């Protein structure tokens, strides 16, 4: 029987070098700012959700979740952009994570035209850490000394630190390659530490012995970032309130 050899493991370092030079992470200063604003807004969202959504799944200590209460849409499950009582969450496709990058670029929410006009349509969103309950966590567990299986990862869906931009067509390797995932895990820890990761502590270093050779694209920090993030957080309060009061 003829067999084809999968040679991907021979090129993990080369792929990592390429993807690292293409990836856009949000700057640490922005993430830290969102974390502080989340502390200020915790009581507002707790009162708004009033037991319908568990606020602690989203705004835990150290969380940079931009849109609390919003979970990723799973094909065929729930009504999108509405509160779903059976899931105790607002269900969304990838619209709300796109708001983060749109506001950061030009202070406006995501629309098809805004996504295109800002050249963001040349990129795809890559979630580095899992944000859906059904997703397997075996890879992540391997990289942390402490891993709480009971933690629900929903806050990671709109975590600013967890939403990375990669050019179209380059996201798939980070979804399926354990080595490439580990490289992006390491970069996340370098930039933001572990506080944005609920239920995961004690990152295991040196799983990839050539990581020091990887050169990363600079994290994104536009001059007007604080003004635009304030607009984003004002928008999130208004939009989530509208949905919960429907």
Image (cartoon, helix red, strand yellow):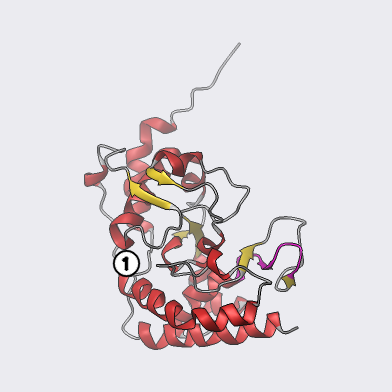
Identify the residue under disc 1.
219
Q: Residue at x 57, y 80 (%)?
A: 45
**Residues rendered magenta in the picture:** 84-95
Tag count in the figure? 1
Q: Residue at x 59, y 54 (%)?
A: 132
Left/right of residue 233 with respect to residue 110 in the rendered view: left
Looking at the image, can residue 16 be seen? Answer: yes
Between residues 59 and 155, which one lies in front from this camera angle? 59
Rendering quarter of residue 219:
bottom left
**In the image, residue 155 above or below residue 67:** above
How many neighbours does mark 1 have within 10 angstroms: few (below 14), some (14-19), or many (20 or more)?
some
Q: Position of residue 74 (x, y in %)?
A: 69, 56
Residue 1 among magenta residues: no
Q: Percent from the top left, x then y, of residue 86? A: 76, 63
Q: Does residue 89 belong to the magenta stretch?
A: yes
> Does residue 40 lie above or below 1 as drawn?
below
Q: Is residue 241 left or right of residue 44?
A: right
Which of the image's four quarters has the N terminus?
Answer: top right
Q: Residue at x 31, y 69 (%)?
A: 28
Residue occupying the point 49% across, 82% down: 41
Task: Classify the position of the C terminus by image quarter.
Answer: bottom right
- Closer-to-camera residue (106/122): 106
Q: Secondary structure at mark 1?
A: loop
Q: Position of residue 183 (x, y in %)?
A: 35, 46
Q: Is residue 110 visible?
A: no
């Amino acid at each position: 029987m003829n067999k084809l050899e999968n040679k991907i493991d021979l090129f993990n370092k080369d792929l990592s070098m390429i993807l690292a030079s293409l990836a856009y992470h949000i700057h640490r200063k922005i993430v830290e700012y969102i974390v502080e604003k989340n502390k200020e807004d915790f009581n507002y969202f707790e009162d708004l959700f009033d037991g319908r959504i568990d606020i602690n799944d989203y705004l835990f200590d150290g969380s940079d979740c931009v849109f609390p209460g919003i979970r990723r849409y799973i094909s065929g499950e729930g009504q999108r952009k509405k509160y779903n009582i059976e899931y105790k969450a607002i269900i969304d496709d990838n619209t709300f994570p796109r708001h983060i990058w749109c506001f950061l670029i030009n202070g406006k929410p995501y629309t098809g035209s805004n996504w295109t006009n800002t050249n963001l349509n040349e990129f795809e969103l890559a979630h580095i850490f899992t944000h859906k309950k059904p997703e397997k966590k075996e890879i992540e567990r391997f990289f942390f000394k402490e891993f709480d299986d009971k933690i629900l990862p929903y806050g990671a869906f709109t975590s600013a630190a967890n939403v990375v931009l990669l050019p179209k067509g380059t996201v798939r390797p980070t979804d399926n390659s354990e080595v490439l995932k580990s490289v992006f895990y390491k970069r996340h820890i370098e930039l933001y530490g572990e506080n944005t990761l609920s239920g995961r502590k004690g990152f295991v270093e040196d799983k990839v012995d050539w990581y020091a050779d990887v050169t990363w694209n600079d994290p994104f920090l536009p001059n007007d970032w604080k003004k635009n993030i304030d607009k984003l957080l004002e928008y999130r309060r208004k939009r989530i309130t509208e949905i919960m009061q429907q």
